[in-house]
Amino acid sequence: MRKVDKHQKYLGIPTIYKRSKKMLFRGLLDRMWKKLRGWKEKLLSRAGKEVFIKAVIQAIPTYLMGVYKFSVVIIQEFKSAMARFWWGGSWDERKMHLLSWDKLCKPKCLRGLGFKDLEVFNDAILGRQVWRLVQVLCAKYYPHGNVLEARLGLSNSFSWRSIWSAKSLVKEGIMCRVGNG
């Protein structure tokens, strides 16, 4: 077995990154474009494109969205790539988009196509992480207090700040229920 001095990625997440968050997600965007370009020549129908976007393209950033808060720029690049693929354009050429991507992200019952809104999805996944951490941390470190009322601190990693950013979303959604036990 050979010894590895420095890991480039661990579970798809870069282990070392500089201050530029855009460079952190560059590999993710490149992977998405590679998949889009690979299917471009095969002339998929609208239904095929819909399934491809929902099942393959929107699944690519899911794991990283559970760890990092994506910037608006990165989410916009994802949206524009998916919209170009949907309307038939490539990176070089531009085709007219008959509806905005936000309208396509509405549920089908509201006359949309049901694509994920990546910004909302990112917040939801980070909120789930916060809820899991709250359950563990409350039991371990805050038996008489509340982790949701704790402060962030001063020097934290990008991962911890990303997860912490969804704390307000979790606090907003928490409700007290009276059950049978």
Image (spheres, rainbow, N blue to C red):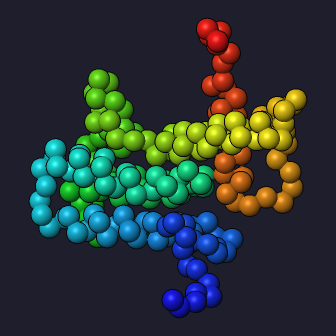
Q: Total number of numbered labels?
A: 0
* Residue 169 visible from this viewpoint: yes
Quarter containing the C terminus: top right
Q: Left or right: 54 with respect to 26?
A: left
Q: Residue furthest bottom?
A: 2
Q: Residue at x 20, y 56 (%)?
A: 88
Whether 109 is drawn above or below 98: the answer is above
Q: Position of residue 107 (x, y in %)?
A: 34, 30
* Residue 93 visible from this viewpoint: no
Q: Residue at x 36, y 64 (%)?
A: 32
Q: Residue at x 43, y 41 (%)?
A: 117
Q: Residue at x 55, y 50 (%)?
A: 66
Q: Nearer the viewer, residue 25 or 99?
A: 25
Q: Left or right: 16 with respect to 50?
A: right
Whether 100 is drawn above or below 24: the answer is above
Q: Position of residue 150 (x, y in %)?
A: 84, 39
Whether 173 is drawn above or below 62: the answer is above
Quadrant for residue 145, please give it.
top right
Q: Left or right: 169 with respect to 76?
A: right
Q: Nearer the viewer, residue 66 or 138?
A: 138
Q: Position of residue 38 (x, y in %)?
A: 23, 69
Q: Position of residue 157 (x, y in %)?
A: 74, 61
Q: Left or right: 154 with respect to 2?
A: right
